[in-house]
Image (cartoon, rainbow, N blue to C red):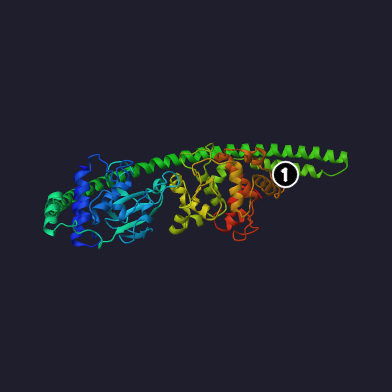
Amino acid sequence: MFLDYRKVISLILCVGLIFTSVSALTEKQSTWFQKMEDEYLGKWRGLDQDGVYGAQCVDLVNNYVAHIFPFSGSRKDYANTIGFGSGGQLYYNARNEYFDKIPYYDGFIPQSGDIAVWGGGVLTSTFGHVAVVYYADQNGMILVHQNGSTSQVVFQEGIAYHALDAWDGPLMGFLRPKTDKIALRNPGMSPDKYNVVMDQKYNLTRVKENVSNVQVAKAKAEQEAKAKAEQEAKAKAEQEAKAKAEQEAKAKAEQEAKAKAEQEAKAKAEQEAKAKAEQEAKAKEKQEAARSEKIAKAKEAAKAKETVKAEKEAKEGKNVKEEEILAVSYTEEVKDAEKDVYTELVQLGIIKPSSTNKKSDLLTRAEAITFVLRLTGQEENARKLSAEDMNRALNRIADIDEVPEWSKPYMAYAVENKLISGVAKMPDGKIVVAAKGNISGTHFSWILLNSLGYEISSVDEVQFSYENMIESKKNFYSKAQEQGILQKSLLNRDESAKIIYDFLKCGKFADSDLGEGLTIKDKLIALNYLSEEEHKRVIKN
């Protein structure tokens, strides 16, 4: 089945060559493709042109070059045109007399018969790769090659232009054989004899007949499809008319049933409302009684406390010490910080949970970057990144395949604005961000401080800056500091919420472009991400 499918593609390609000049294959190039299909495709065979190292990618390309250029037919005649070397070296070694060298750029579409060249991968292969282009469009290529995914000759479809970059290095460009140098026939052979040999060897008459048969079959298929579509449209119209009549009858019955049900429901609702009102009145009366009792007890406790305080002041003959006033404020802040910080930040929209994550789940680096951008009012900027800016930033990430799709705008913005520098740097300059990896308390705080415009260069500076930020808010109680969350090597979502709470309470921007001296709270309110009432409800000033 696979072989027949490739033959159909080949015939379509031949039809394209008759009616368009996009591919512009010479007869020599066409017969080489036919030879590959007839002698290698589906037969689990490799092609060893030079007789050393087995079936390599350059062997197949060298066979192609020796076939199309007018030399004696020796197995190594390719050396006079494309030269020696590994896959990536052929781009430079190929003689300009025989090839146009076309550097690859995004959007470029090669022609059938071009030789694609990869320059050698950083992570794995240093030899590069070469293949002959069978077909290409804006989505990718069908390649004839070997020793890429297998050591046999294959026609491989669906190869995107950057699909082999990680293994074989960047797609450098294409070698395009110059048509004026391609042999019309072998030296010393008359045109008539050449045509007879080619027809016998590659059955060119069969190919031309098949092209005609494809055109006839296509016209017949179009007629049959049209007749079938008309029949289906007629049957569909009849079914729709029948369905409409049934729907109308059903709708009428439903309306009558609905009217009856509404009357019954109305009567039932009135009874239930009356019973509910009586229950609520009793419950309210009970609540008021309990509230009055609590207020009375609170007043008695306050009065007793004041009496003790007055007696103490009278006995000592002086006012309450300043340390005692601070202790009261400190206790009130402790009470405020003890509440469920994670839930409050969820209500503010800074943390957006899903049904699959829990407060105890470890925080990933992708989630950490997202939290930071929401907290500092930069999420909208990340979501508005142009496709060009986003792709430029993402191309600097070596492990881009590990970056979740939903987090790519945020990771791109963080890389573009140097909020993160990665956990490692590759020889080609790309960084490893480990988006699915976990993050420590210090690293999370580091990213937060960077997002506010502070230039932090060491772990000690993170701790120092964090402590200064907390101390700038008089009497503020930091649960993150008290629990040593900054020192944790693996941070969970609940612990990250406590750090975010500290920044929302005490954080200020240091970068003038972001709003130097402006508090995070004031900026979120100014951007309408947070209302004054919401902030007062969650975090007391």
Against 225, residue 268 (above or below) is: above
Position of the N terminus by quadrant:
top left
Residue tagged by mark 1? 329
In front of the other: 119 or 312: 119
Residue at 62%, 58% (x, y): give it.
Answer: 511
Side (left or right) of 86 relative to 329? left
Q: How many marks?
A: 1
Write down the quadrant of residue 177 in the picture: bottom left
Query: What amino acid type is highlighted by mark number 1?
Result: Ser
Q: Where is residue 189 in the image (x, y as percent from the top left)?
A: 15, 57
The reply to whether residue 407 is in sight is yes
Against 228, residue 184 (above or below) is: below
Q: Position of residue 497 (x, y in %)?
A: 58, 43
In front of the other: 256 or 69: 69
Q: Where is residue 294 in the image (x, y as percent from the top left)?
A: 66, 37
Side (left or right) of 455 relative to 232? right
In front of the other: 190 or 101: 190
Against 466, residue 14 (above or below) is: below
Side (left or right) of 338 relative to 112? right
Instruction: Give the SS element for disc 1.
Output: helix
The reply to whether residue 349 is in sight is no
Q: Where is residue 339 in the image (x, y as percent from the top left)?
A: 61, 40
In front of the other: 405 or 461: 461
Task: Estimate how packed mark 1 is, as few (under 14), some (14 to 19) or many (20 or more) residues with alpha carbons within 10 Å.
Answer: some
